[in-house]
Image (cartoon, rainbow, N blue to C red):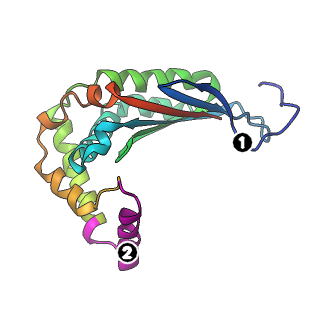
Amino acid sequence: LRAKPDEKSDIPIKILDSGLCQAWWKQDDMFGLPKSKIGIRLYSSFSSDNVRNSVITSFWCSALMEELNEYAYDAEVAGLYYSLSGNSVGVTLMVAGFNDKLELLLDVVVNKMRSLNEIKEVTFDLIKDKLVRSYRNAAFKQKPYVLASHQTWELIHQKNFPMVEQLEELEKMVPSDVAGVNELLLSNCFLEALYE
């Protein structure tokens, strides 16, 4: 464990600011546990171009998590966790757990992100079925106040696409639509990271 800092800080400290990345760090000055959390937001112009690309990004993230399922189970047993999600502005990656092995998990996930050019047909079918059910439920089977809240959110945020449009795009998807998405996402992006 590192020594507690002399002064407590409620806000993170910016440790990197370049044209491609901004990174912040915040010391755990309360609990002193050997655990950390890294949150990375990857902003990509590909995801925000249109509803189709946003859906493809979310699909790719779900497929990547499915591909890493076995590894994620072993990591979870060791006290490490990660999540990856796509949205209309890019990708959000969260890694949490014990400090000494966190870098290893992050390395495995990032390498998979770089290398996942094509998705196996079995994985594609599994993810498509799961996401179609999820999108249908979100679009049509919510309580009225939840639907109203989602539609208000869609109106307020310009890059948030309506769930019905996302469902239409998802239903039209074929495996070739997801091929090479990693290169499109990573070729023109900006990263924000928080390490705490």
The residue wearing badge 1 is 11
Is 64 on the left or on the right of 74, as rendered?
left
Relative to 178, does residue 151 appear above or below in the rendering?
A: below
Picture quadrant of residue 165 = bottom left
Query: Is residue 147 within the magenta segment?
Result: yes
* Image spot of residue 141 (x, y percent): 28, 72
Identity of the residue drawn at 19% across and 35% down? 178
Q: Earlier in the sequence, mark 1 or mark 2?
A: 1
Q: Secondary structure at mark 2?
A: helix
Magenta part of the protein: which range? 139-158
Cα distance, mark 1 to mark 2?
A: 34 Å
Residue 160 in view, yes or no: yes
Name the residue type under label 2.
Ala
Magenta segment, prevailing SS (helix, strand or loop): helix
Image quadrant where one finds the C terminus? top right
The residue wearing badge 2 is 148
